[in-house]
Image (cartoon, rainbow, N blue to C red):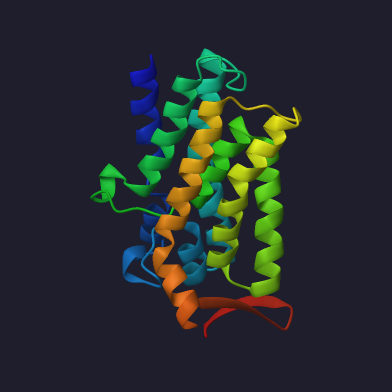
Amino acid sequence: MTAAIGIGSYLAGAVPWAYVLGKVNGIDIRDHGSGNVGATNIRRVLGWKWGVLCFLLDFLKGFTPALAAVLMVGHGRFGIDDFAVVTACLAAVAGHVWPVFLGFKGGKGVSTIAGVLLAVAPLSLLFGGVIWFLVFNFSRYVSLASISSAVFLPLSAVFFSVSCIYPLSPILQGMLFGMSFLVILRHRGNIKRLLEGTENKFERKRGNTSEKQV
């Protein structure tokens, strides 16, 4: 069952929605903007409506396999066959980051990880979302907000577990640390540009949010 869950989750995660939405609009998203196959680049190239749609689709391809695994083998909070749940979560994220349909070159995993977290660690997702919102509104850098959220995400899971607010088993806590590391690793190019002062920044203009190179 665990193997079947892993394969199904990977294939669900590997659906390259950013690429599909780009093709719907007559472009290959890999040739535009940052070239990343993800919601932020879709928003950058095609506008915020397409960006929101892409985020939701990428979110669901993490949430759906994770929730299905939880429903099939247990809640996934107290060690009830957590290995199968972790397999589903990691496979879905791996599908997004390394999709077989695009030569194993995909997105950065933030949207899909958020979907996974809603299924297995909703309070940590909420905490990470607050961090993302605060950092983005202060800095206007999507990448910095994502990195900051990734740093605090597993720490919040440990806190919620130790305080018994929302206990997670050690294997699930370890998974969150692994996902945090993956997000930061996938943003290494952004980190370099942030240090150099050349990262893309979203600026508000006349009530709207636009993006410019700074």
- Indicate left or right for 100 with 5 as reference: left
Q: Quadrant of residue 70?
A: top right
Q: Nearer the viewer, residue 158 or 5?
A: 158
- Indicate left or right for 76 with 42 as reference: right
- Identify which residue is drawn at 52% across, 32% down: 64
- Residue 48, placed above or below residue 1: below
- Identify which residue is drawn at 71% across, 29% down: 166
- Residue 182, placed above or below residue 62: below
Q: Nearer the viewer, residue 130 or 59?
A: 130
Q: Where is residue 210 drawn, in percent x and y?
A: 60, 78
Q: Where is residue 66 drawn, in percent x and y?
A: 51, 29
Q: Is residue 27 visible?
A: yes
- Indicate left or right for 102 with 77 as reference: left
- Identify which residue is drawn at 40% across, 57% down: 186
Q: Where is residue 92 drawn, in percent x and y?
A: 42, 36
Q: Is residue 58 visible?
A: no
- Residue 181, placed above or below residue 115: below
Q: Nearer the viewer, residue 168 or 29?
A: 168
Residue extending farthest to the left is 103
Residue extending farthest to the front is 162
Number of callouts:
0
- Residue 65, placed above or below residue 29: above
- Identify which residue is drawn at 36% across, 67% down: 35
The quadrant the N terminus occupies is: top left
Q: Where is residue 119 drawn, in percent x and y?
A: 60, 31
- Indicate left or right for 139 with 62 as reference: right
